[in-house]
Image (tube, rainbow, N blue to C red):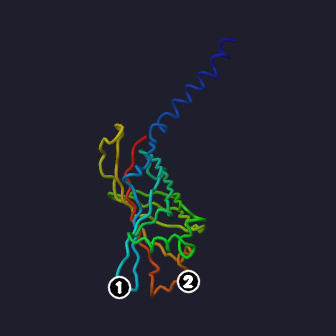
Amino acid sequence: MKLARFVPAGIAAATMILLAPSMRSQTTWKSDPAHSEVDFSILHMGIANVHGRFGPVECTVVSNDQDATKSTVQCTIHVDGVDTGVAPRDNDLKSANYFDVAQFPTATFASTSVTKGGSGMTIQGNLTLKGATRPVTLDVSGPTGPIEGMGHKTHEGFEATTTLRRTDFGIGAKVPTAMLGDEVKLTIELDLAKQ
């Protein structure tokens, strides 16, 4: 009878011992919205790049310290905060002609694979924007830091870049590429705080 009582506890203890290394190897990080953003640039009339940004951006990264390929990234980007510095243009971008923020206020990114190489990483995932989901590849540099930030949390910085085609997401579908380039360059700046 005593043995039967102790077997479950023994199994539980053994399970915790086996799981402890994997639990310790995972760290959750969340983006600091005051110091994270998504910037973009696109060629206008074939002569000059127009720059802008989305925001805020909210990301959760679960990093695996022992095996980077087991890390995951989930982000929500507030497209309804698009800002190019020109109010009439921003209002047009928010309309159904472009981002249709009334129906699609946010975009999301979910990683499907993480590969570490050199001083950075390559993150592949799915970007959902204006109701369309397409695969994208992020070239990531970092981390910078770590430093101790607000609330005595450890912070690290990352920069990711990618290029996508606006027409793949139905953005400005009626606008000819001679007027507005098809390729959009994205730069994602993240200040991540350890949780």
Q: Which residue is mark 1?
A: 47
Question: Which SS class for mark 2?
Answer: loop
Residue at 44% over, 63% down: 54
**Quadrant including the N terminus:** top right
- The amino acid at mark 1 is Ile
Q: Position of residue 93 (x, y in %)?
A: 49, 72
- Give 141 or 150, whichever is nearer the viewer: 150
Q: Which residue is mark 2?
A: 174
Count residues near mark 1 (Cα–Cα under 10 Å), then give few for <14, some for 14-19, many for 20+: few
Quadrant in the picture for residue 86: bottom left
Residue at 43% over, 70% down: 87
Count residues near mark 2 (Cα–Cα under 10 Å), then give few for <14, some for 14-19, many for 20+: few
Residue 64, placed above or below residue 132: above
Q: Are marks 1 and 2 in contact (CB under 8 Å)?
A: no
- The amino acid at mark 2 is Lys
Residue 145 horizontal side relative to residue 43, left or right: left
Residue 98, placed above or below residue 117: below
Residue at 66% over, 16% down: 5
Quadrant in the picture for residue 4: top right
Quadrant in the picture for residue 195: top left
Q: CA distance from mark 1 to mark 2?
A: 20 Å
Q: Earlier in the sequence, mark 1 or mark 2?
A: 1
Residue 151 horizontal side relative to residue 69, left or right: left
Residue 109 horizontal side relative to residue 144, left or right: right
Q: Position of residue 107 (x, y in %)?
A: 53, 62
Question: Which SS class for mark 1?
Answer: loop
- Give 49 or 89, whichever is nearer the viewer: 89
